[in-house]
Amino acid sequence: METVATEGPQEWRARLEALRGEARQAGGAARIEAQHAKGKLTARERLELLLDPGSFVEIGQFMRSRGAAFGEDGVGPLGDGVLTGYGTVAGRLTYVFSQDFTVMGGSLGEAHAAKICRLLDLAIQNGSPVVGLNDSGGARIQEGVGSLAGYADIFLRNTLASGVVPQISAIMGPCAGGAVYSPALTDFVIMCQDTSYMFVTGPEVVRSVTHEDVTSEQLGGAAVHAAQTGVAHFRAQDDEECLRLVRALLGYLPQNNLEDPPYVEPDDSPGREDVGLDIIIPESPSQPYDMREVVTRVVDEGHFLEVNAEYAQNILVGLARLDGHPVGIVASQPMVLAGVLDIKASEKAARFVRFCDCFNLPLVVFEDVPGFMPGLDQEHGGIIRAGSKLLYAFCEATVPRLTVITRKAYGGAYCVMNSLPTRGDLTLAWPMAEMAVMGAEGAVNVISRRALADAPEEEREALRAQLVAEYRRRFAHPFAAAEKGLIDDVIEPRHTRARLISALHMLRSKRRRNLSRKHGNIPL
């Protein structure tokens, strides 16, 4: 009987080590050097910085690219241009993929897509966050429609994972064409200044179709998406800062939608008072102040991780902690457009509110809003629909919802900013707060129009001032709203932190589900 030779331990160990060496070599020394020359780290270097030391476990490292583009045997390089696996961030399980630009420009083929889909399936199944480090030339042309189908497979899983596990996308190189839709479906996008860009159609296509001569940076660089489109939630200066941001962001988020966000033992006293808050509001109602300072004075140790900081700056959104527990902050910003709500601000805040509700982050609102932005551009641009998105988001949210009215709460903007009638859990007001249909001057112009018109011209301004003062005395103060039960308490500003923390403890057992339905129809 003929015997079949088998590999002994030495042979298979040598073979295994050779394959691992081939995988680690990636695209070769020259391409790694070129990556470094661009100011970019390699795929493996990025994972080493992102994850806790020694925690990365690779999955699928022996998968190979396949197809006619790779010669007669149709077998291409190991890994197919992407590293996939899992590790820990601050000791918590995190799934990661890192596209390798040194291997075929990080282009996505069928094996590449299959590895990412496998990772997303594991993340959904086991309830842990996914971080994607994107650095890819896009769909691999040589694999034709198969590479496009691979993108569609990924998009499906991004959608299935949405609201189940946190998804973070770091754009650390090119991301163009259909590839942009995967990051756009995730919860947060971080871009690197000067080395990353995102666009659906590149400069060459734009030039041939519209005859506009633009660079990749002008078309879809980090500055464009951070400040103009809002696609990028954060802009980092380099790969290292980008990965630090990912780690910081994960520190505020739960593993999945069934868990609470991670508690951190605070060094900041829950009863701490800040007398500076008592004098932060200017005497003139038209004079601005920085709401960011209000937020940092209230939250634990002044740490506020602002999201979309460069976009729609008339509203602030971000993450902080109160007594060690993560919360989502939504705050008017009187320093920009007097804190008025416009289309961009409404949509920015609405998406953040929905994210917080997905992942059990209580919402804390600091309100100083004079209304919605007037004008043809806003009305024709759909401010009705945009404002209703924010209203819908707050009304739908089942997490604890707290509001502090610091100064103005006027008109429809009062309603959409987590008002008590929309089932906000607690509404507090500072003593200088005003809640009304409109400001005193506007109200007097409407209510007393005839009296002002009939008054002698030389007496008109004095009469107007008298009527404004009377309106403010009767209506423009928080006690009028408190009498109607539309706010829960009027507090000294210095007590804001203690009252918010007390309310959050009171609401910790709040139910997290609305009545059963397939889904509502948000006004998109």
Image (tube, rainbow, N blue to C red):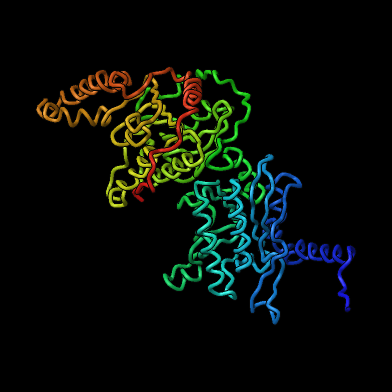
Horizontal arrangement in the rendering, residue 382 relative to residue 109 (left or right): left
Q: Residue 432, how many percent across, how many down?
A: 36, 21
Tell me which corner region of the image, top left, top right, bottom left or bottom right, holds residue 481: top left
Which sits in the foreground, 510 or 169? Answer: 510
Measuring from the top left, give residue 310's x and y in whole percent: 49, 45
- Quarter location, residue 489: top left
Is residue 265 placed above or below 135 in the rendered structure? Answer: above
Q: Residue 182: image x %, image y %?
A: 52, 57
Residue 406 seen anywhere in this rendered image of the structure:
no
Q: Residue furthest left?
A: 454
State the residue in front, 17 or 230.
Answer: 17
Counting from the top left corner in percent of width and height, residue 431 is at: 37, 19
Image quadrant containing the N terminus: bottom right
* Left/right of residue 254 with respect to residue 392 in the rendered view: right
Q: Is residue 123 visible?
A: yes
Q: Residue furthest front?
A: 1
Q: Is residue 499 above or below residue 143?
A: above
